[in-house]
Amino acid sequence: MDGRRRTIAARVEGHTSGLKPSELKALDRLSQRRYPPAGGYSPEQARELAALSRLLSRQIGLALDRQGRVNMVIVGDTSSILIPELPRARSGAGRLRGLRLLHTHLTPDGLSREDLMDLLFLRLDSVSVLTVDEWGQPGMFQSAHLMPPVPGEDASGFRTEALIPWDRVTTDFTAQAEALEEEFSRVLDGAVRIGAEEGGTRAVLVSVSPEPRSVQERNLEELAELARTAGITVTDTMIQRVAAIHPRHILGRTKLAELEVLALQGQDSLIIFDGELSPAQQSGLAEVTERRVMDRTQLILDIFARHAVTRAGKLQVEMARLQYALPRLAGKHRSLDRLAGGIFGNKGSGETQLELERRRVRERISRIRRDLAGLRRQRFHIRARRERQGLPVAALVGYANAGKSTLLNALTHADVLAEDKLFATLDPTTRRLRFPEEREIVLADTVGFIRSLPRELTEAFRATLEELEAADLLIHVVDASHPGREQQMEAVERILNDMGLGSVPRLTLFSKWDRVSADARLDLTAARPDALPVSALTGAGLAEVARAVEKAFFEDGLRRHEPQRWQDFEKASRKRQERQRAD
């Protein structure tokens, strides 16, 4: 009786407009059948399905579970069928959906590319087609199923069987699906083991942009470095140059299928896009892939969250993450659409769970802003005290992982954390750099820059970046060994200009000089004769850097800042922010 209720509950979906009540009843009768897994159907069921499809002049599809029960009857048009939303996939990365699709074609053609795309994106147990001749009789049969990836082989991700007469089908589709799941799990277990040895989560990186391929390759190299910093193992990359980016899915359906195959081959649970995805794009991608989708901004925010140690750093990261998440709350959980309180009538309909969640996020952002304002004020008074003592300030700036912290340690004999990772330093660090004749300055190390710095981070790390505004001299540290150093220098200069610091005096350093070849050294010194080469590892050039800084402050008389009141500083800061927003 339970099974009977289950089959009656199967719904008819799709292109049902214009159908007669008798035709709808015939479709409903299909939903009450049990289709044997071995062979896929009985001869009577095949004839019934073919005759009804020809009568309606529409494709008919059946979503069947592993017991042969009809989960859904789908009606298409003469040439295609659109699968509506299916029940949630079974949990587990190695699991198939537990449904196979059997549908008709009114032509002699076998499985179409659209059929195979549905197989990939929906992770169906299998997809099968039964062709129907002009007299409404079944003709040929063809099926396809996903294939576990084979290391070292570039496969399509699925296997398509040959067309065979409709009454020669011997496949046990349930046994086939269970065997495939077992093989997927075996491959996945091996991938998880390797992933754990290599660093954890496995991901494929994607770049979709109108920029040239060479630029996209360079950007993906940086994205891969970000992923490595976050403990993610990169298995493959995809590059697509487009004139215009798809507003919802980023990629076209064909490229999305290629991406799904890459993820299947690499047994990836994560897809990372270079650039920032809009909320609509993230939800659109989530509809066509069951893997987690992340953009570059979210990856950077996750790295910042890992590296935040102090209370100030944690507050700044939390605010940035909340600002990023706020517009993406809609549709994240279906339960967020439910009413949270109130009654109908004169009292109003109440506040939905989504509105309640948004209000809580905004309130938390407001509290963090107040806390960060207090932090900014505290740091202002520290800087003001240094200015009253007559201590000049130099700040190290540069691209992420350019070697700023290592250079700070080498110049001041400090022990600041320095790692070969992006964003190893988040909180500003200051140390005194002493010279002969009882001279000294304050040398500050700040968070590294990166191209297209997320706006959430720019606002959240305002308290940190104000250390740069208080500097009399900016020491621009450039990784001379990096192949994209020119682009990195341009990105840093662009960010400094956006912050209103374009006029601050500069001293450019070529760091990691020991990693640069002799020929490249000649080219660099010829192109940038004012830059000083330095190697914190070998110590070469450190004395020259210290001498240049000492000369700038104590011989050339470089000094920009005078002590000021907090109110004046805050007013100037607000004006600067307004100019930036206007630009």
Image: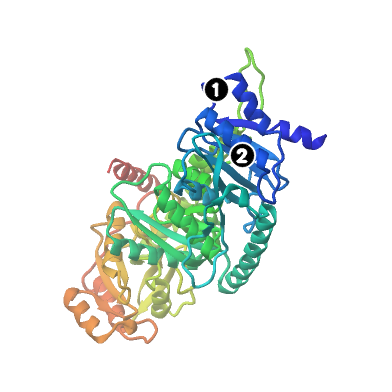
Q: Is residue 116 above or below residue 159?
A: above
Q: Name the residue beneath numbered marker 2.
A: 62
Q: Quadrant of residue 440?
A: bottom left
| Colour mode of the rendering | rainbow
Residue 284 percent coordinates (x, y): 48, 43
Q: Is residue 150 above or below residue 87?
A: below
Q: Quadrant of residue 428?
A: bottom left
Q: Is residue 102 above or below residue 407?
A: above
- Identified at 63% across, 35% down, the residue is 48
Q: Name the residue beneath numbered marker 1.
A: 19
Residue 563 percent coordinates (x, y): 34, 55
Q: Is residue 1 above or below residue 463?
A: above
> Does residue 87 appear anywhere in the picture?
no
Q: Earlier in the sequence, mark 2 or mark 1?
A: 1
Is the residue under label 1 in contact with that under label 2 (CB below 8 Å)?
Answer: no
Residue 13 percent coordinates (x, y): 58, 31
